[in-house]
Amino acid sequence: MKEAVPNYYHKFQCIADRCNHNCCIGWEIDIDEETMVRYSAMDGEMWERIRHAISGEVPHFILQAGDRCPFLNEAGLCDIICECGEEALCEICTLHPRFRNFYADFIETGLGLCCEEAARIILSETHKFSMVLPQDVSLLDEERLFFARRQKIFDILQDREKSIKARFSILASAFGFDFNFSLDALCSLYLSLERLDEAWTKEIDALKGFSFDGGIFEDEAFQIRFEQLSVYFVFRHLTEAMWDGGYESRVCFVLMSCYYIGALWARHRAKKGHLKLDELADIARRYSAEVEYSEENLEILMQPDFLG
Ligand code: SF4
C-alpha cells in the first residue's frame, strides 16, 4: 500500500531505555491473528516463552507487576527485539506510536502524541506541517473533497501572519461556534470520562478554579507549538468526517483540546515560572494517553450535541 507521512515523521526513533513513560508499561497489548499464527509455528526456548506469556479470548500478553509487559527487561529494552529482532513483534508493537488514516489507494501514517519522543518532535517542529501524497494515487471524489476541505483548515491554522488565538477564533467561527470554552465545564467533562491514571485526576482537580485568561494563546513563545498541536489533532481525527460528515464536532474537539492543553500549560507555567519543551510535551502526552487512546472518551468528546 502506498504511504504518505508528515514532514517530521522520519525524525522519530524510539528512545527505549531512555523513555520515562515507556509504552510497554500500563497498556494491554493484544496480539493480532497473523502474529499468533507465526508465534504458534516457531520452535525454540524464546518462542515457548512468548507463547506462555499470552492468554485470553482476544490473545494478549499477560502483564506483570506494575502492569509491565513481560518482555520489558530491567534495562528497559524489549527481550523479543533483543532475541528475535524487530520483525518478531506483533502488529501493535510494530506500529506504536504511529497511527494510520486509510484511503482507497493509500494510507497516511502519523506519529501519536501519547509517545513522549513523538510529542517532543511534533511540538518542537518549526516548519509548517506538510504531507506529500505518493505518486500516482487515485482519489475518490469524496477524498478529493475531503483533502480540499482539510487543506483549508490547515491553511487557517498555519497562517503565521495572525496570532494563534486569532486563527483558532477564525476556525471556530467558520464552523459556527466561539473559541471560548468554560474551563470549569471542561474540567467536569474530563472528570466524567474514563481515566487511566490517578495523576490525571489530580491534574484536572488542580485546574479547577485556575484563573485562565487565555493569554498563552497570544504569547510569542507558544505560537508554533499550538499550531503544530492543532494541526496534529486535525490530521489525526478529521478523516472520519469524510464519511460521517462530522466536521463541526471534530473541529470543536480539536479546538477544545488545544484550549484545555493551553490551560494546563498556563497553570504549570504560573506555578514554575517557565516551561521547558519536555514539560510541554509531557502534558500533551498525558492528554493524548487519556483522551485519544480511549474509544469511549473520543466518542463522548466528539458528540455533535456537545456543541450545545
Ligand atoms: S513511548 Fe515512544 S519512545 Fe517511549 S518506549 Fe514507547 S515508542 Fe519508545
Image (cartoon, rainbow, N blue to C red):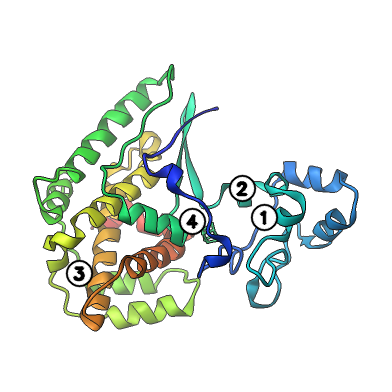
Q: What element carries label 2?
A: helix
The amino acid at mark 1 is: Asp
Mark pair 1, 2: CA separation: 12 Å
Residue 143, given in percent of the width and then of the height, sits at: 37, 27
Residue 223, given in percent of the width and then of the height, sits at: 18, 56
Mark pair 3, 2: CA separation: 40 Å
Q: Mark 4 points at which residue?
A: 295
Residue 123, given in percent of the width and then of the height, sits at: 32, 56
Q: Name the residue under label 2.
A: 94
Q: Name the residue under label 1.
A: 30
Image quadrant holding the C terminus, namely: bottom left
The amino acid at mark 3 is: Ser
Image quadrant holding the N terminus, namely: top right
Left or right: 213 as drawn, with respect to 253: left
Q: What element carries label 4?
A: helix
Whichever of labels 1 and 2 marks the residue nearer the N terminus, that label is 1
Whichever of labels 2 and 4 marks the residue nearer the N terminus, that label is 2
Q: Which of 165 and 307 is in front in this view?
A: 165
Mark pair 4, 1: CA separation: 16 Å
The answer to whether marks 1 and 3 mark residues whose Cβ atoms lie closer than 8 Å is: no
Residue 283, given in percent of the width and then of the height, sits at: 36, 68
The amino acid at mark 2 is: Thr
Classify 179 as above or below 267.
above
> Mark on residue 182?
3
Whichever of labels 4 and 1 marks the residue nearer the N terminus, that label is 1
Classify 273 as above or below 122.
below
